[in-house]
Image (tube, rainbow, N blue to C red):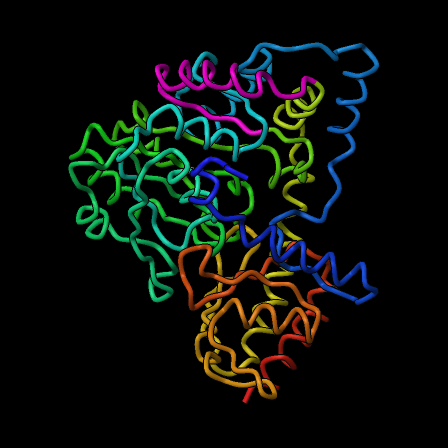
Amino acid sequence: MNLADRVSQINEPQTIAMAKKARALQAAGHDVINLSLGEPDFYTPDHIKNAAKTAIDTNFTYYTPVAGIPDLKQAISSKFRTENNLDYAPEQIVVSTGAKHAIMNAFMAIINPGDEVIIPTPYWVSYSEMVKLLGGIPVYIKGGIENNFKITAAQLEQAIGAKTKAFIFSSPCNPTGSVYHANELQELAAVFLKHPSLFIISDEIYEYIYFDHKPQSIGSFSNLINRTITINGMSKGFAMTGWRIGYMGAPIEVAVACEKIQSQFTSATSGISQKAALAALTSDKTPSFEMVTAFKKRRSIVLEGLQKIPGIICNNPEGAFYFFPDVSAYFGKKHGETTIQNASQLCNYILEQHHVSLVPGDSFGDENCVRISYASSEENLIKACKRMQAAFAELK
């Protein structure tokens, strides 16, 4: 068929591709441990579900304003102010169908063909594909494992050019779990102040999932709020992936543009989900903190398991629920007559032979690594670590 050229310019996310392979093996009767998807395995807390049930029972089932219901926008504005030191008025808030939707809205509002967007690597798989879909040009800055996968202010300064329109990053980061500390953000902010036409997109979807240093919003530094687009949502911190609620706080011109764009694509997101999100943001967050406690214990299990595999280089992530180890020491080794040439082949081997699903790192911007999600039970993680240890031991 004569499809649009843009279809061939982007790729299906490797996270989804590996999950498909894992499900196919499971359907064939294999005991597969899926560590490929970034989805909390906890249930949505009851008080949030009850708010949605109340919305249904009281017939809150009609179209809502495109940018979100007023009380939710007010709650988000208050949350930004009290938790993140960000001053976004309710009219600067746009509620969308997931944080991914919010990011795409932001890109559509600011990127013209030929504009450059700086993306530190490793990065979440969809950033670069969104930019390319809009005719923009991704410009990558490598954050190496020696610096916990974080870039420096000097690297940022060097990457900014005449065509640079935006910078996007996440902290805590998917896929590395890295968290930028206050001093590091301040150094980046000093660079941004030299380039007043550059937008900053801060993806803070993993904000509540941290173990050591509390993440800070870069928009709270050095008067950057007037060109910072802060992205967040309900999926990770509240175990609400299927509810599809994301949101942004943005300069008023960007927020108005995003509302205009969204009105022609999806219109408003589900009103029932919005009522659930309102309950989540305005109620006790103890269930979220309990999830983080569980994730911290799981992190220890996986770190201990990975440290038993010779040749793997691994740091201890400070947030989110991922490890991103360097596995390049095993490239060139064989399993039987098959030589493992790269991370993709390694992941396929571990999945097919040992039934653990991981994601190759090339789709995140680092071909030497694999992403391991520890959003799974302790029992599954212990089994998965033993299987991975056996898988790597078989490579000669």
Residue 82 lies, in percent from the top left, at 48, 26
Say which of 112 and 183 sits in front. Answer: 112
Say which of 329 and 179 sits in front. Answer: 329
Residue 307 lies, in percent from the top left, at 54, 76
Q: Is residue 87 visible?
A: yes
The outermost residue toward the front is 1
- Does 255 appear in magenta? yes
Q: Is residue 170 visible?
A: no
Q: What's the residue at 52%, 66% (across, down)?
A: 344
- In the image, the segment drawn in magenta is 246-271
Q: Is residue 275 above or below residue 181?
A: above
Residue 17 lies, in percent from the top left, at 60, 54
Q: Quadrant of the C terminus?
A: bottom right
Instruction: Report which quarter residue 201 is drawn in.
Output: top left
Residue 135 lies, in percent from the top left, at 34, 35
Residue 272 horizontal side relative to residue 100, left or right: right
Q: Quadrant of the N terminus?
A: top right
Q: How many marks?
A: 0
Q: Is residue 221 above or below residue 78?
A: below
Instruction: Report which quarter residue 240 is drawn in.
Output: top right
- Does 277 appear in magenta? no
Q: What's the residue at 22%, 52% (across, down)?
A: 155
Q: What's the residue at 46%, 78% (across, down)?
A: 331
Q: Is residue 97 above or below residue 367?
A: above
Q: What's the residue at 76%, 16% (across, down)?
A: 55
